[in-house]
Amino acid sequence: MSCTEFLLHTDKRTRTLLQDPKVSLKAKCEILTSSLDKQCDEIKGLEKVKSDAKKQMEDQNMMLTQQSDQLRCLHEEKQIAQKLVEKFQNNMAELENTVSTLKEKSGSKSQLR
């Protein structure tokens, strides 16, 4: 980072002090050190925010994966349930036909007597 770029990233008071010819070189070094320390702290804070956001995204991704798996299982269970309902309805229709046939046979036997 050049001096000009550094000055752009510092507050107005710090810039003024660094550019003032009356301020001693030792004081300017202390100001620069302090300013760099603040910027380092800000960077560390931003890195923590970034790290926390990444962790949160990973957690959400894991949750979405689990929910996706649950939805897939529910869909499979729904398909199985639909097949069972279909089978039940077919069995009921068959049973009704059988009952109807037995009633007809029973009615025809009673007419023969």
Image: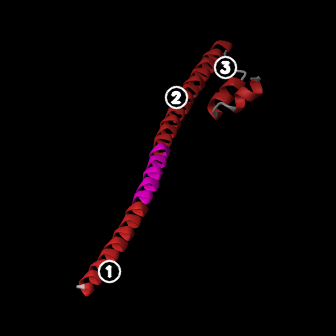
Q: Count neighbours of disc 1 (C-alpha within 10 A) and say few if under 14, some if 14 to 19, many if 20 or more.
A: few
* Percent x, y of residue 54: 54, 33
Number of residue marks: 3
Residue that numbered label 1 is attached to: 104
Q: Residue at x 34, y 68 (%)?
A: 95
* Percent x, y of residue 80: 43, 53
Going by the picture, which residue comes out furthest to the front? 113
Q: Quadrant of residue 35?
A: top right
Quarter of the image with the N terminus is: top right
User: Range of the magenta residues?
Assistant: 68-84
Disc number placed over residue 23 in the picture, else none? 3
Q: Residue at x 71, y 32 (%)?
A: 8
Q: Count neighbours of disc 3 (C-alpha within 10 A) and say few if under 14, some if 14 to 19, many if 20 or more.
A: few
* Percent x, y of residue 68: 50, 45
Q: How is the image coloured?
A: secondary structure
Q: Earlier in the sequence, mark 1 or mark 3?
A: 3
